[in-house]
Image (spheres, grey):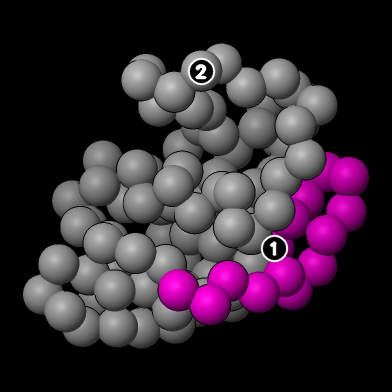
Amino acid sequence: MGLFMLTACGPDEPAENVASVEATQVRTCESIRDDVIRIAGQNGVNVVKIYDPKTISNTPKKLDCTGRAMVSSGQEATIFYRSFENADGDRLVQYSEQKMD
């Protein structure tokens, strides 16, 4: 196993101390990094920062990204992450050490 849990997923929502976000907000690989870090933390992975975010693909329902993640031990690894709309219309964020389908 690598630095992260193989994959984790959670709601794409602002933190409690951040102003509410409109559903029409444009999502970018830069803008969803904090959501990935929050979800990783909820799953016991302390990601400190995601560097060098790059867009793999971007459609109205899904944004796929990659970058370099640093964890609290100082180790770095490639991370793949996405924001997507599920069948119920909810926005979710997912991350993985391996490219996702």
Position in image of residue 57 (x %, y %): 80, 67
Residue 99 in the figure: left or right of residue 40? right
The residue that appears at 37% across and 44% down in the rendered structure is: 39
Residue 86 in the figure: left or right of residue 58? left
Crowding near the residue tagged with mark 2, few <14, some 14–19, many ≥20 C-alpha atoms within 10 Å: few
Quadrant for the C terminus in the image: bottom right
The residue that appears at 83% across and 43% down in the rendered structure is: 61
Q: Which mark is residue 19?
A: 2
Q: Residue 58 sits in which quadrant?
A: bottom right
The residue that appears at 53% across and 77% down in the rendered structure is: 52
Residue type for callout 1: Asp
The stretch drawn in magenta includes residue 59:
yes
Q: Residue 15 sits in which quadrant?
A: top left
Question: In the rendered image, is residue 99 in sight?
Answer: yes
Give the main secondary structure, helix, strand or loop, of the magenta stretch.
strand
Residue type for callout 2: Ala
Q: Residue 38 sits in which quadrant?
A: top left
Residue 14 in the figure: left or right of residue 74? right
Question: In the rendered image, is residue 2 in sight?
Answer: no
Q: Which mark is residue 64?
A: 1
Position in image of residue 53 (x %, y %): 58, 71
Position in image of residue 27 (x %, y %): 71, 45
Tell me which label, 2 or 1, sits earlier in the chain: 2
Task: Give the residues in magenta.
Answer: 51-64
User: Of helix, strand and loop, which one carries label 1?
Assistant: strand
Q: Residue furthest right?
A: 60
- Marks 2 and 1: CB-CB under 8 Å? no
User: Of helix, strand and loop, which one carries label 2?
Assistant: loop
